[in-house]
Amino acid sequence: MSTTYHTIISTEEKKIWQLLEAVCDPEVPVLTIVDLGIVRDVKVKDNGVEIIITPTYSGCPAMDAISMDIRLKMIEHGYKNVKITSILSPAWTTDWMSDAGKRKLLEYGIAPPQYRSAAAGNKEQNIECPQCHSHNTKLLSQFGSTACKALYQCNDCKEPFDYFKCH
Amino acid sequence: MQDLNPSNNIKTFKELESSQIPPLGGGGASPSAGGAASLSLHLADTNLILAQRNGEWCAHGPILEQDIAITNISLDLIGQARNFYQYAAQLINQSSDQLTNAATEDSLAYLRTEREFKNLLITELPNGDWAQTILRQFFYSVYQYGLYDQLQRGSDAQLAAIAEKSIKETTYHVKWSSEWVLRLGDGTEESHERMQKALQNTWAYTGEMFMPADYEMGTGTDFNLLKDQWEKKVRHVLEEATLSYPGGAGNENPVFMQTGGKTGVHTEHMGFILADLQYLQRTYPGATW
């Protein structure tokens, strides 16, 4: 019996993960919250669903909007009792971003993180330009249009671009 | 500050006053909860007030990229402050018998008085010029990095989680502010002079970081280690920036260090900051947008 029960739960959880793949980051709308790696866990319980998320940066103003969007998506599909829990540890890193997410970022014109978080150090130079793919680029500012991005410029095509920095 | 259920979270000032939140200095019925709550409030307040000060640069930064940088740092600090306020609120509500959910992150930020704020004095100083803002950020970020490094290995699981999260952001702040200290200190004659003046204006407010308040005792933070690490890094960067390091052992004229912020005794600037910060919630209690 327990096996059957477990299978049912898994199917349910799988379905919810699929729903979450339709919730996008409001500031980088090509990325889903699953691509971004901020959904930690989905727990189906007797009386509802708990979705565990983690913030990218402490002050990310998108987190409140994301919680709201998750809730709306769940309600849309008949889940009335949804609890959204935010946890901080272990802290989010860009290593949790999916390969699909990185590809989508590049296509969107944002350079994706180019190193493993722990290995990034001071190596974040010569970031590939998302426009002309030159590596002859320079850092303009560590802080960009959102907390998660830095501002770079390409020395070849001269276009400034956002880089999703390793974190 | 936003909460997912804003409708019943913000109490009016009178409600909050009459709710008699127990003193947070450690004298309550549950001293350990009181101590942890006070510590969390101190960390929250310090981040919030510096975020508020840095936020004054919004649209006034020397160039667009740096305007964005200083306000990005503000945003990080506000996020960290929110995490500490939420934890403080949880501890306060747990230790209070008669009241459930009296304190929220919003009530703690918007409805406490000057004497209840426990932020470091250095954060409430006026911004001065860009040099002074930079130097303060550098002093604070180096201190914050060392503190978070200890907290993330500390015994309080939630403070450790917040520290583990925040230290990654503080790493950027240390890097950015150090680069600016070098650029200005070792820049033009005028920028050097301004940095030297900023050093005179802010140095007396750095000692408070390493003088533990009651609620910081027994929390596992090694303040001597914190101070040693801070002095080493600050001295190194200041000297590289061709600025004179005012501290250190053997200094014949040690600067008298100003204290009081950690226990709610503030400079004359604090009331003005709170007037700005709290006006809306004081005037229109519970207003949301």
Image (spheres, coloured by chain):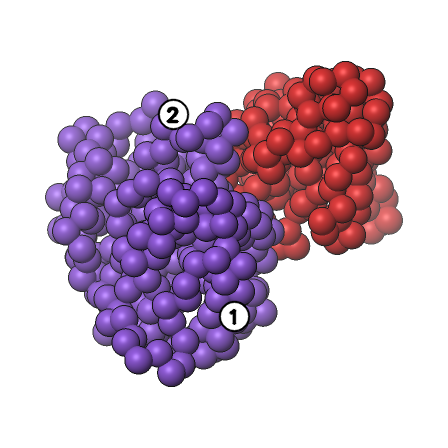
Does residue B14 appear left or right of residue B52 in this picture? Answer: left
| B228 lies above or below B82 | below
| B79 lies above or below A24 | below
- For the residues labelled 1 and 2, the Cα–Cα distance comes to 34 Å
Residue B189, picture quadrant: top left
- Residue B59: which numbered mark, if any? 2
| B227 lies above or below A147 | below
| A51 lies above or below A136 | below
* Chain hosting mark 1: B
Residue A11, picture quadrant: top right
Picture residue at 21% right of the left edge, 61% below the top = B264
Chain letter for purple?
B
Picture residue at 84% right of the left edge, 23% below the top = A133
- Residue B232: which numbered mark, if any? 1
Label 2: state its secondary structure: loop
Query: Chain A is which colour?
Result: red
Can residue B169 be seen in the rendering of this structure? no
Q: Nearer the viewer, residue A155 or B139?
A: A155
- Residue A97: which numbered mark, if any? none
Q: Position of residue A80 (x, y in %)?
A: 57, 28
Q: Amino acid at mark 1?
A: Lys
